[in-house]
Image (cartoon, coloured by chain):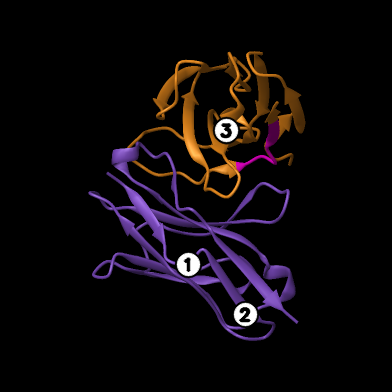
Amino acid sequence: AQSVTQLDSHVSVSEGTPVLLRCNYSSSYSPSLFWYVQHPNKGLQLLLKYTSAATLVKGINGFEAEFKKSETSFHLTKPSAHMSDAAEYFCVVSDRGSQGNLIFGKGTKLSVKP
Amino acid sequence: DAGVTQSPTHLIKTRGQHVTLRCSPISGHKSVSWYQQVLGQGPQFIFQYYEKEERGRGNFPDRFSARQFPNYSSELNVNALLLGDSALYLCASSNFRTPYISYEQYFGPGTRLTVT
């Protein structure tokens, strides 16, 4: 069965410092992996996706993620945090086993200090 | 272009009542999925509809049902509401055609359901 583990429930960084949000996945097939962001009282916005092309994926707002099959990881990074990055981030897996439906992690809350 | 729209935005119901939530997908998208997000958790898959047929169902009781209309909009119905049904209900649309490929799903703002 597919699953996602977000290794940190809360990450706090200072503005201008790098961001690292960690995600490990489990999948019996070639997975598609996504990162979604949810700002308070808002819906989910797709940040980036991996679908078996380049292993380093660039997304919106300066975020990127690297697919590492050997480590079953898909960590999200950003070189320099901005105050507007403060939100909840979800790592998501989808594959043939889930028939394309999304399996979400529990989320990582990112706080950005001035 | 308009994104995914949902109505109502907020809803307060009493235990035992019934609720209907509505969703309109992005123009051109024929698939709608529903997710439940309990406070502090990631969304959980409830249903997927494509071309008015149910294509997938998550691990939810039969009190939950849904349907999709000819214009691809969708309703989620929940009967005999329990306190534990209090959550944000999210609708997502996609350009789904086959279950063997993963498609991007675009989410609406959600309906916040409170059961008292």
- Give the residues drawn in magenta, as a range: B107-113
Q: Which residue is mark 1?
A: A8
Q: Position of residue A57 (x, y in %)?
A: 46, 68
Q: In which chain is the residue bearing label 3?
A: B
Quadrant of the rendered image containing residue A83: bottom right
**Amino acid of disc 1:** Asp
Tell me, yes or no, whether the highlighted magenta stretch contains residue B6: no
- Tint of chain B: orange
Would residue A4 be found to the left or right of residue A110 on screen? left
Circles 2 and 3 on the same chain: no
The reply to whether label 1 and label 2 mark residues of one chain is yes
Q: CA distance from mark 2 to mark 3?
A: 38 Å
Q: Which chain is purple?
A: A
Under circle 3, the secondary element is: loop
Q: Residue at x 66, y 18 (%)?
A: B20
Residue sitting at 66 percent across and 17 percent down? B19
Nearer to us: label 2 or label 3: 2
Decide: few, some or many residues near mark 1? Use Cα within 10 Å; few <14, some 14-19, many ≥20: some
Q: Quadrant of residue B26?
A: top right
Q: State which chain disc 2 sits on.
A: A
